[in-house]
Image (tube, grey):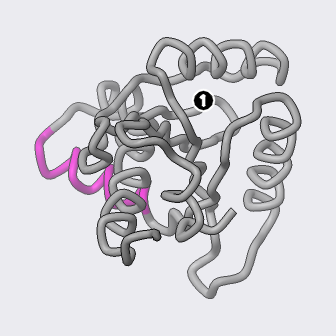
Amino acid sequence: MDIAELPARLAPGARLLGLDVGSKTIGLAVSDGARRLATPAGTIRRTKFHTDLAALQAEITARAVAALLIGLPVNMDGSEGPKCQSVRQFAANVSAAIDLPIVLWDERLSTAAVTRFLVEQDVSRDRRRDVVDTHAATYILQGALDRLAHLPPTA
């Protein structure tokens, strides 16, 4: 689904869950009800898909989420490599199991930007490893929220 189609599918106050899907973890971020601010919401340690899905469903329920925004790791030249294919397959599998709108959002350089910020804040390497995925999800979700804020109102 294109992000421009999302507002028409959401009730007022509906929250979004942003995901940064990696091979070892899934970073999570959640929006506020006004869909203006993304907040880090932890990580899911990846194991098997059905276990990951159960953890994701628990987060969706606990946070009253109405849609998912999944970061798509597009290459700098705009092409899609194996990581994009993996994320697209993950999104398709989630879509088959969870009846929520899913938007794929270009996340180029999100992890690099977050890592650079954490280094500038003098966060230790061990601590960066613990928080980079949830902060990358926050960065991704905030970018999408900023885009949503600039869409024309739906009729």
* Coordinates of residue 51 in the picture (x, y in percent): 77, 13
Position of 95 with respect to 21 (left or right) is right
The part of the image, by quadrant, that contains residue 30 is top left
Q: Quadrant of the N terminus?
A: bottom right
**Stretch of the chain drawn in magenta:** 110-122
Query: Residue at horizontal 41%, vertical 46%?
Result: 136
- Taking depth in this image into account, of 122 and 109 the one nearest to the observer is 109
Q: Residue at x 62, y 62 (%)?
A: 73
64 sits to left or right of 130: right
* Residue situated in front as seen by the camera: 47 or 14: 14
Q: Residue at x 63, y 75 (%)?
A: 75
Residue 91 at x, y percent in the picture: 76, 46
Residue 74 within the magenta-colored segment of the rendering: no
* Above or below, comparing residue 67 to residue 78 in the picture: above
Residue 129 lies in quadrant: top left
What residue is rendered at 62% in x and 87% in y?
A: 77
* Residue 52 falls in image quadrant: top right
Left-right relation of 138 to 80 = left
The amino acid type, in three-letter code, at marker 1 is Thr
Query: Dot 1 corresponds to which residue?
Result: 25
Measured as percent of width and height from the top left, residue 151 is found at: 38, 74
Q: Main secondary structure of the magenta part?
A: helix
Whether 135 is drawn above or below 44: the answer is below
Most extreme residue toward the left is 121
Residue 78: x and y in percent read 64, 84
118 in the magenta segment = yes
Query: Nearest the camera: 136 or 140?
Result: 140
Find numbered disc 1 in the image and state the secondary structure of the residue it sits on.
strand
